[in-house]
Amino acid sequence: MGDDVAHDEYEGRLFIGGSFREARSGRRFDVVDPCDESVVATAADADAEDVSDAVAAARDAADTTSWATDHELRQRCLQQLQVGLRKETQEIRALQMAEAGICSSVLDSHVEAQIENMSWFNDLIGRFPWETDFPAFSLLGMQSLRRVRYEPYGVVGAITPWNAPFMTDLWKVDHALATGNTVVLKTAPDTPLSGAALARIVAEHTEIPAGVVNVISSADKAIAGEALTADPRVDMFHFTGSPAVGRRIAERAAVGIRKACLELGGKSANLILDDADLDQATGLGVAMCMSSSGQGCALATRMVVHASVYDEVLERLAAIVGVLPWGDPRDSGNVVGPIIRREQLDRMAALVDRARDAGARVLVGGERGDRGGKGFWYLPTVVADVGEDDEIAQTEVFGPVLTVVRYDGDDDEAVRVANNSVYGLSGYVQTSDPERAWRIARRLRTGTVNLGPAFYLSPDTPFGGYGVSGVGREHGEDGFREYLQAKTIAYPQVSA
């Protein structure tokens, strides 16, 4: 079965308390293919009452089932989920192209790799130190032994973005469940079908108890989001999305002093030093910017280039990006697909237009693409001669737009320019000197750094940001512990 697999009707209902149902209002909304603006399917339009029902189901499952304490059950159920996802891979791939416009050329990293990466977290359930005993400690005249236990928070409100819907839905659900929490997953309005598909696979392929997983969709992200974050029965929030929404969630979570992990935006710098292999650096730089049509938070969208190689780099960038294939994401030859919606396309075009008006030079692209007057397209673009403080150098564009900033001076200057951002999600360093790369990496104020042809994303190491790029981590034991609370139990040492 190929990536063009067709489905008469994708699942689009709410999943609450182990069952699919329509929204209380009976309303549905259209899910639009950004390639041609056709309707892929419809999804249930949840309101505050539906959200309350989902939280109630998650709360009941957290309080009355053995999910939090039965590690063997959790491990078995999540292994079942992994097997079920493997069987449904082609449908999942088709969904990513249909509702999010993700190019098939990168879908292996969005789908298959993420399904296989579940093994690391699922295995961690069996080897994590859930309880650790400490030797006696004397204080206040008492000899006390201590035992540290790790326990789940309870109910996790997971809120995911549209740019990588299956990937982020799976991360949050798998990580929350592996640690013994129950979850209410609120999907993005543009991409609700991926979450509904995940719920269907949970229902059809696993023994996960009713209420442990709940999935809601809503045409208005604010209505469902406000209802979820206002509900005191939710113990923790895990959000991926924009800094503005992240701030709002943090404010809401502060009521009741509830935990919030926030993976937010980025404007990651790619440092091209004076001794870099320019063919490799520019080819890699384009790939790391244009992958997923530039709609990725940790992509290398801000290239910071030493003056001595600046003109050579621009020449190479124009040659590469000028012929970069774009169009139908179902065509495996295309690198850049559509923009998710018209509002995002308008915002991106305005950013580039303002940069051009302010004196920046658009080497290639810089305009909307046309495919029969349908869909939301923007040509792969390089904007050069940008000042480090200019709007387009400081703002996350979230599209196929590479911003190039020139710097003079030594590595101190390179680091200063790279760190001149409110964001701190990722960084990239291109140099032929490994020791030089490591020196710079240690000074970058980012949660991840990539040296040369390397990329940070893996299940066993943490991912997250500094500054406006967020708080908390996903993946690795650091990400596992984000979903857990530590409890110390002291008890008296009994003399033999």
Image (cartoon, grey):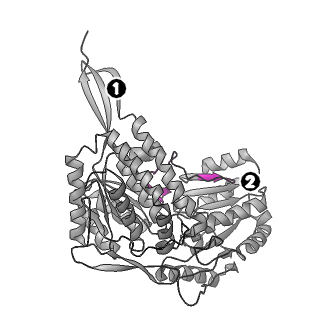
Residue at image mark 1: 133
**Rendered location of residue 489, percent (x, y):** 26, 30
Q: Residue at x 32, y 73 (%)?
A: 218
Q: Measure the alpha-carbon separation of dots 1 and 2.
A: 47 Å
The dot on residue 431 is 2
Q: Is residue 264 magenta?
A: no
Q: Quadrant of residue 305?
A: bottom right
In the displayed structure, 123 sits above or below 224; it is above
Kindly identify the amino acid type of the residue bearing the numbered disc 2.
Thr
Seen at 29% across and 22% down, the residue is 145
- Write down the quadrant of residue 58 in the picture: bottom left
- Does residue 457 belong to the magenta stretch? yes
| Helix, strand or loop for disc 2 | loop
Residue appearing at x 78%, y 72% in the figure: 315
The correct choice, above or below, for 221 with respect to 126 in the image is: below
Snapshot quadrant of residue 421: bottom right
Rendering coords of residue 317 (x, y %):
73, 70
> Does residue 106 appear in the picture of this structure?
yes
Mark 2 neighbour density, 10 Å: few (under 14) some (14–19) many (20 or more): some
- Most extreme residue toward the top, as rendered? 496
Q: Quadrant of the C terminus?
A: top left
Residue name at image x 63 percent, y 58 percent: 416
Dot 1: element = strand
Q: Which residues are magenta?
A: 449-475
Asked whether the viewer can see residue 390, the reply is: no
Q: Left of 75 or right of it: where is 2?
A: right
Task: Return the x and y of residue 473 as percentages of the image width and height.
Answer: 45, 51
